[in-house]
Amino acid sequence: MFDRFFHGCVVLLEEDSRAEKWNAVCAMIASLEMNTVVIWPPVFYRNGKADVEVQRSFLKAAAEYGLGVIVELTGQVSDLEYLPDSEWRREFAVENFDGTAALMQNGLGELNYNHPEVNARIKRFLEFVVGELKNEPALCAWDLWNETHFKSFDAWTLNLFREWLRKKYVQIESLNRVWKKSYTDFSQIRLDPVTWASIVPDTDWEEFRVMRLAEIAAEWADVVRGADALHPVTADNVMSNAVWSEFDRGTDDWQLAKAVDCFGISFYPKTGGRLLKENSPSLRTFTFAGAASAGNGTFMVAEMQSHCYSELFPCERVLPHELIDWNFEALFQGACGSIYWKWEPFRSGFQLGGRGLVRADGSFSRRAEAAEKFGAFLKRYPDASRLTPVKTAAVLYDRRTNVTVKAMNNRIRHIIGDDQPARSRLGIAELCFQRNIPLAVVTPEQVSGKNPFFCSFLFLPYQVVMDQKLADDIESFVRNGGRVVASAPFGSVSPEGCLFDALPGGPLHRLTGIRVTDSREDSFHGLTMDLQEVEVIDSKVIMNSDNGLPLVLCRKEGKGWFFFVTADLWNMELIGNEIFDCVLEESGTLPVPIRANCHVEYASGEEFDYLWVPNYENAEFCRIQMNREAEVIFGDGELENIAGELILKDARQMVLRMRKELGA
């Protein structure tokens, strides 16, 4: 799809800037071994008319310095994109649940994409910009929609929801049976906050929002491709659904990725827990693994945090070595691009003084030097520009479980929240990271085995929802030699929002070999936990609670194994570690391709295999059990190969390269 790794930055255009400035900016960007620039806004309005002369001027300057340009078409600032302020009308705004205009939704004020006139204006705008700029030599892609987000409770959206429900249920009686309602026609359906009798009105609404957002992206992509069949189309979400449990934006990475040629994410690890629970290597790596899964093996960091939030809020400052870490973490998970947000600090707006690779006076910062180091690496080792990560285990991400938990916790969210599935996934990610188990993310649609990341181990933490197809695919996976590790609560709820009779597992109940009889408070090594009491029917108990109740069980099925943990313990460090190791030992197959006393990531290029050894703890020595000749191609430290072991001294951010083994 792309003939190079997109390494670059975002430049915010100013209406009064001249060609001389763009020449100077492009020269500086190119000197940092970058090859790509993303520009925004896509137009400026002069007397109410859209004009692209500033954009064209930048594209011509970029061509002079061999830079490719991605034009960002829409974000969330309508007056600098598809609707000038002179033509704004209140009816275009998205609406709150009470029917009032949500004028500051998302802090940016995007408009109602379902309003027919807004929809038509956007499409005319896309045709105009693409038609004006598609023949510029520097153009390399269109960024269709930056940081997707859409939420509105207006009449247009409600009508689309009704049509979506009509296609799903066909007969109003079918909807009434699932929703526990008494409508006589789909036109009567309202957004009703009274969901005591059924959670499905909530889960259907969230599913509609996800599918409609992806549908909007696909419609816009068709317009762009209709005007320009040569250049690829990208779009991005914020962070990764697998890591960030957030329902407000209405996004699904996998659905958005289907609409575009290259899926991207905005990546801001240092936001005090606003986007990433904590800035840890395991969660960053898991974020990229989720993005790669959505992108079918590849993705783009469409925005990488480059510095602090603003001049007044500098605590999110980014250090040079962090940019190096983040770039290689992404590269070793399959990234095809890293774009820094942004080139220079904000000169206006509420983020004044924030972000930027250069200082306010335009001189290079330390972060610019770090970006140059990464760019020089990509240029010197082109084989490393597109790596295929090696994966041996996977964790299931199912958005149905996310929204089901949200709906079930609707009235008690203020007590327990609704991020339990995300926290369980993150616990698995941390445990795998500590053991150098390369973890992929898969969705229910990918469990069939066709996904390139599907592996010998499959973790199902907090998988509340189960349907017959997923149950059949999991059982087939186990019978063919796979290892499945599930934990309570598991397979309790059908997609129709009903409790199964057979617990745990519902349609997968037989495979568990147990029956849930009750729940109770218990402990393990003195640490309190909620536990499901079970009757053992056809399973082996391999670990008990302090009170002697089954805690971990396993059952052989065909060539594989099914493990069940009767509590959600992955985030309890002491318990989680012991249970995790118990499962790995009992399975008889440790999914660890490389033994090391430090964290390493292993990926394959066309000609060589590569190891990323960040050594986050700054250990004096790192030992890797691998009987292969290797050379250091990036980073600091010394390498020795002694008796089948790679020994690194004073290693930091090292990349090792090895010739491919015969037959590999």
Image (spheres, rainbow, N blue to C red):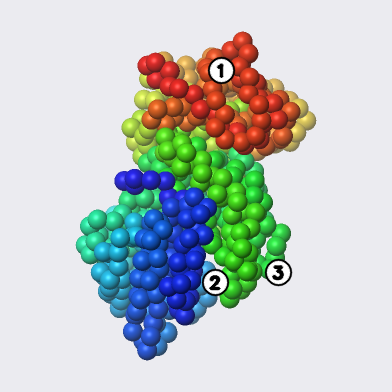
Question: What element does badge 1 sit on?
Answer: loop
At 54% from the left and 22% from the top, the residue drawn is 630
Coordinates of residue 596 in the picture (x, y in percent): 62, 23
Report which residue position mark 3 lands on.
312
Which amino acid is tagged 2?
Answer: Gly
Q: In whole angstroms, how far apart are the C-alphas of marks 1 and 3?
A: 49 Å
Asked if residue 124 lies left or right of residue 331, the reply is left
Question: Which numbered disc, 2 or 1, marks the residue that appears first in the sequence?
Answer: 2
257 to 63, vertically: above or below:
above
Q: Pinpoint residue 482: horizontal percent, then vertical percent.
A: 43, 22
Please tell me which of labels 1 and 3 falls first in the chain. Answer: 3
**What residue do we see at 40% from left, 65% from top?**
61
Q: Quadrant of residue 304?
A: bottom right
> Mark 1 is on which residue type?
Met
* Circles 2, 1 touching at the beta carbon (< 8 Å): no
Q: Nearer the N terminus, badge 3 or badge 2?
A: 2
